[in-house]
Image (spheres, grey):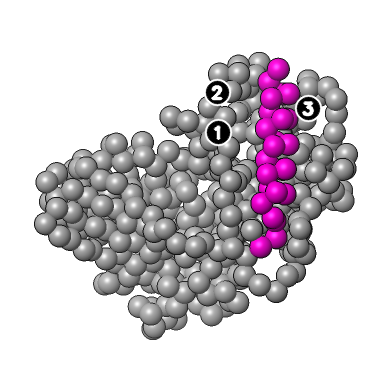
C-alpha cells in the first residue's frame, strides 16, 4: 500500500501541497518502514438485511466524496489530487468484496497517513447515507489545504510556535523509564494491558463536574503524576489527542486533522492545585494547538516517545445506525508497537483504560507497576 501503483503517471499541472503534520510524520517513517501504520478491518454484513450491489455503489460513492482518497504523494512527500477510475484501490488503501451464502464482507486495508479516528467515522456515516439514497455533504479537503498553507504564514501561527517552545523547553520525563534502551536494534512488539474503571465512573463524573475538567483530563493528570512517581521527578509531561475540527469547514473532512497536544504537570500535594494545572494546560493546549509542536523537528526526538492519552470513539454505536446488520472484524495478529506507551480510554458499557505499550522496551512487571500508580492516583484524586 505504500507504492502509488494506480498513480504511475503524475500530472505535471496538479498543484502540490505539503502533507498535514501527522501524515508527514507517517510518511517519513514509511521511508524506512514501508509497512508501518498499515491496518486491516472487515465489515461483515448480513445478506439477509442488505443488498450487496447497493452497498458496493454506496461505498464507491462515499470514497469518491473524500478528496484525500484520490490524493497521491510524490517522491518528495508532496500530495496532489489525482483521481483514478479504480476508486477501490488507492495509494494507501484498498477495498475488496467477498461473499458466501450468508455474509457479504467488505475487506479494507488502509494506512494511518490518510486520516484520524474521526475520519473513519465520517466515511462510515457517508456509506450509510449513500446506501439510504441520501445526499452526501461535500468534503472541502482541498480548500482546507489551501487555508492551512496560508495560516502557516500568519502571525498567530508564529506566536503559537514561540509560546509552545518556551512553555515546554523544560527537561522532564515524558514516559516511564524503559527497561531496555530506546535505540535497541529490534522491531518493537506491542503489548496490551486493560484496566477496568467502571466501578469508579460515577465518582469520576462528579469530580470532573466539580473541577470543570473532562474525565479524560483526569486520566491524563493521573498518568502524568504516575510518570513523576515512576521516575522520581517533580515534573512530567505527556501528550493527549485532540480531535480539533473547530471550524465549520472541518466537520466533514476525511484527513489527518487530529492534534497531539503537550501537557506539563508539576508535583503538588494539593488536589485543587493539580486540577487547576490540568484545566489550564488543557485550555492553553487547545488555544495553541494549530502549531504542531510535538510533530516538528527537533522536538520529535523527545515527543515521539511521550505517553499519549486518547479518548476512543464508540465504533459499535455507529454500527447500530447502519441500515443493515453488520459487525467489525479485526484480524487477530501480532502487532508492531507504533508508540512507546499509549493510553486509550473507552467509555461505553464499561469505562476501560487500554494500555498499548512496546513489550520490547517494557517488561510486564514494569507496566503493571506503572498502571497501578495510575490507578492509585485516580483513587486519590476522586476521594
Query: In the image, residue 31 lies at what x, y percent?
Result: 58, 76
The residue shown at (73%, 70%) is: 184
Furthest residue toward bottom: 9
Q: Is residue 128 above or below residue 189?
A: above
Nearer to us of marks 3 and 1 is 1
Label 3 SS: helix
The residue shown at (69%, 25%) is: 379
Within 10 angstroms of label 2, few (less than 14), some, or many (20 or more) residues?
few
Determine whether label 1 and label 2 are within 8 Å by CB: yes
Q: Horizontal placement of 164 versus 350: left or right? A: right
When asked about the image quadrant of residue 375, the answer is top right
Q: Can residue 352 be seen in this snapshot?
A: yes
Which residue is tagged 1? 196
Cα–Cα gap, marks 1 and 2: 8 Å
Q: Horizontal placement of 212 versus 91: left or right? A: right
- Pick whichever of labels 3 and 1 is earlier in the sequence: 1
For this rendering, which residue is in front, 231 or 256? 231
Cα–Cα gap, marks 3 and 2: 23 Å
- Pick whichever of labels 3 and 2 is earlier in the sequence: 2
Which residue is tagged 2? 199
Which residue is tagged 3? 274
Furthest residue toward front: 365
Nearer to us of marks 3 and 2 is 2
Q: Is residue 271 above or below residue 26?
A: above
Q: Is residue 369 magenta?
A: yes
Q: Can residue 164 be seen in this snapshot?
A: no
Label 2 SS: helix
The residue shown at (68%, 28%) is: 378
Q: Which residues are magenta?
A: 360-383
Q: Horizontal placement of 63 versus 73: left or right? A: left
Q: Is residue 267 magenta?
A: no
Determine whether label 3 and label 2 are within 8 Å by CB: no
Amino acid at each position: 500500500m505504500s507504492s502509488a501503483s494506480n498513480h504511475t503517471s503524475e500530472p505535471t499541472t496538479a498543484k502540490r501541497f505539503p502533507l498535514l503534520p501527522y501524515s508527514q510524520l507517517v510518511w517519513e517513517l514509511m521511508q524506512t518502514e514501508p509497512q508501518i501504520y498499515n491496518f486491516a478491518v472487515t465489515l461483515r454484513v448480513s445478506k439477509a438485511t442488505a443488498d450487496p450491489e447497493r452497498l458496493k455503489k454506496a461505498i464507491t460513492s462515499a470514497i469518491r466524496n473524500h478528496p484525500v482518497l484520490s490524493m497521491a504523494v510524490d517522491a518528495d512527500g508532496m500530495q496532489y489530487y489525482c483521481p483514478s477510475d479504480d476508486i477501490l484501490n488507492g495509494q494507501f488503501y484498498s477495498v475488496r468484496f467477498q461473499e458466501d451464502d450468508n455474509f457479504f464482507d467488505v475487506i479494507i486495508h488502509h494506512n494511518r497517513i490518510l486520516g484520524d479516528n474521526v475520519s473513519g467515522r465520517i466515511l462510515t456515516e457517508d456509506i450509510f447515507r449513500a446506501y439510504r439514497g441520501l445526499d452526501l455533504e461535500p468534503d472541502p479537503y482541498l480548500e482546507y489545504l489551501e487555508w492551512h498553507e496560508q495560516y502557516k504564514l500568519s502571525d498567530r501561527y508564529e506566536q503559537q510556535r514561540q509560546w509552545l517552545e518556551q512553555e515546554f523547553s523544560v527537561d522532564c520525563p515524558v514516559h516511564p523509564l524503559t527497561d531496555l534502551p530506546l535505540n535497541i536494534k529490534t522491531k518493537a512488539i506491542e503489548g496490551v494491558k486493560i484496566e477496568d474503571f467502571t466501578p469508579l465512573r460515577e465518582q469520576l463524573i462528579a469530580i470532573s463536574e466539580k473541577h470543570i475538567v473532562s474525565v479524560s483530563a483526569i486520566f491524563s493528570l493521573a498518568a502524568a503524576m504516575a510518570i513523576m512517581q515512576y521516575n522520581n521527578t517533580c515534573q512530567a509531561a505527556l501528550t493527549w489527542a485532540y480531535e480539533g475540527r473547530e471550524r465549520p469547514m472541518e466537520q466533514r473532512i476525511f484527513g489527518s486533522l487530529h492534534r497531539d497536544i503537550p501537557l506539563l504537570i508539576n508535583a503538588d500535594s494539593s488536589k485543587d492545585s493539580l486540577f487547576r494545572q490540568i484545566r489550564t494546560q488543557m485550555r492553553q493546549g487547545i488555544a495553541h494547538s494549530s502549531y504542531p509542536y510535538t510533530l516538528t523537528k527537533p522536538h520529535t526526538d523527545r515527543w515521539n516517545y511521550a505517553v499519549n492519552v486518547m479518548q476512543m470513539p464508540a465504533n459499535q454505536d455507529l454500527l447500530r445506525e447502519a441500515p443493515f446488520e453488520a459487525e467489525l472484524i479485526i484480524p487477530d495478529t501480532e502487532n508492531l508497537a507504533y508508540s512507546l506507551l499509549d493510553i486509550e480510554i473507552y467509555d461505553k458499557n464499561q469505562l476501560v483504560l487500554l494500555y498499548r505499550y512496546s513489550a520490547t522496551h517494557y517488561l510486564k512487571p514494569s507496566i503493571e507497576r506503572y498502571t497501578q500508580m495510575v490507578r492509585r492516583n485516580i483513587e486519590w484524586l476522586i476521594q
